Image (cartoon, helix red, strand yellow):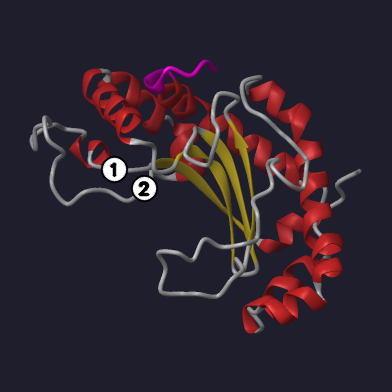
Amino acid sequence: MTFTGLPKDYFDFFNELKANNNREWFTDNKQRFRDSVQEPLASFVEAMAPRLKKVSKQFVADPRLNGGSVFRIYKDVRFSKDKTPYKTHGAVQFRHALGKDAHAPGFYVHLAPDEVFYGGGIWGPPSPQLLRIREAIRDKGAAWDKATTSAAFKKRFGDIRGDGLTRPPRGFEAEDPRINDIKRKSFFAMAEGKPAQTKKASFCDDVEAAMKDAKPVMKFLCDAVGAPI
């Protein structure tokens, strides 16, 4: 497969799905979903594989439609008030080779009709890994500052993002100069994009550039949780 950009129907599909988020409509459009969403995303993953290796050989680009880098469209609605069954966006995660799920360090690409962003980080790590990251930020503050305040990082991403606690976690001082980051429950750097970018083969260049700028933060996070990079 050769990635030449996402087809126009990629975003049209999700716009229509948002208005018809039910099993009947999706069943009627399942082949369209495969042709306009799954296959283009798989070709994007395949195109990113050699670029990803330039950033780090520890992250995986797997173009399989089931169990690979492309996220499933089916939502987990068990704990959600919104019971609509399907996500209204496509997404890709290039997960660390040691990771088994979306909570591992990884590079992420989010592709919705009204929102495109891409970068890297770790989302909702389990408690032991979260503690290790917080301790690393506290104990290796200079390295954290270097990774998150470089000119390239600030220009591309602005700041580290991620939901956080309202109070310092147990064992950490409120006066710590990096307490705002220590309080986070997720840590990620994301660059804002536009749907028009994704319709060209050069979108791969955009994502690769963001990965390179995010690598110092990814290295810090991987080192903290004991994952090689």
Quarter-wise, where is residue 75 in the image?
bottom right
Asked if the stretch drawn in magenta spans residue 183, the answer is: no
Relative to 182, say whether 39 is above or below: below
Q: Quadrant of residue 132?
A: top left
- How packed is label 1: few (under 14 Cα within 10 Å), some, or many (20 or more)? many
Q: Which mark is residue 118?
A: none
Residue at (70% x, 23% y) in the render = 53
Q: Which residue is mark 2?
A: 162
Q: Nearer the viewer, residue 158 or 105?
A: 105
Distance Cα–Cα, label 1 vs label 2: 6 Å
Query: Which label is found at residue 184?
Result: 1
**Kind of residue at badge 2:** Gly
Residue segment shown in magenta: 223-229
117 to 140, vertically: above or below: below
Q: Which residue lies most toward the bottom here?
A: 19
Residue 7 in percent (x, y) is at 84, 62
Q: Percent from the top left, x then y, of residue 200?
A: 81, 53
From the viewer's side, name the closer residue of 170 and 193.
170
Splitting the image into 4 quarters, where does residue 33 fall? Answer: bottom right
Contact? badges 1 and 2 (CB < 8 Å): yes
149 or 45, nearer to the observer: 45
Q: Which secondary structure, mark 2?
A: loop
Measuring 57% from the left and 28% from the top, which residue is drawn there?
96
Q: Point out the image quarter for the C terminus.
A: top right
**Residue 162 drawn above or below residue 47:** below
Is 61 situated left or right of 159 in this image?
Answer: right
Kindly identify the residue that appears in the image at 83 percent across and 45 percent down. Answer: 43
Q: Report crowding for label 2: few under 14, some 14 to 19, many 20 or more residues within 10 A (C-alpha).
A: some
| N-term-proximal mark, 1 vs 2 | 2
Report the amino acid beneath label 1. Arg
Residue at disc 1, secondary structure: loop
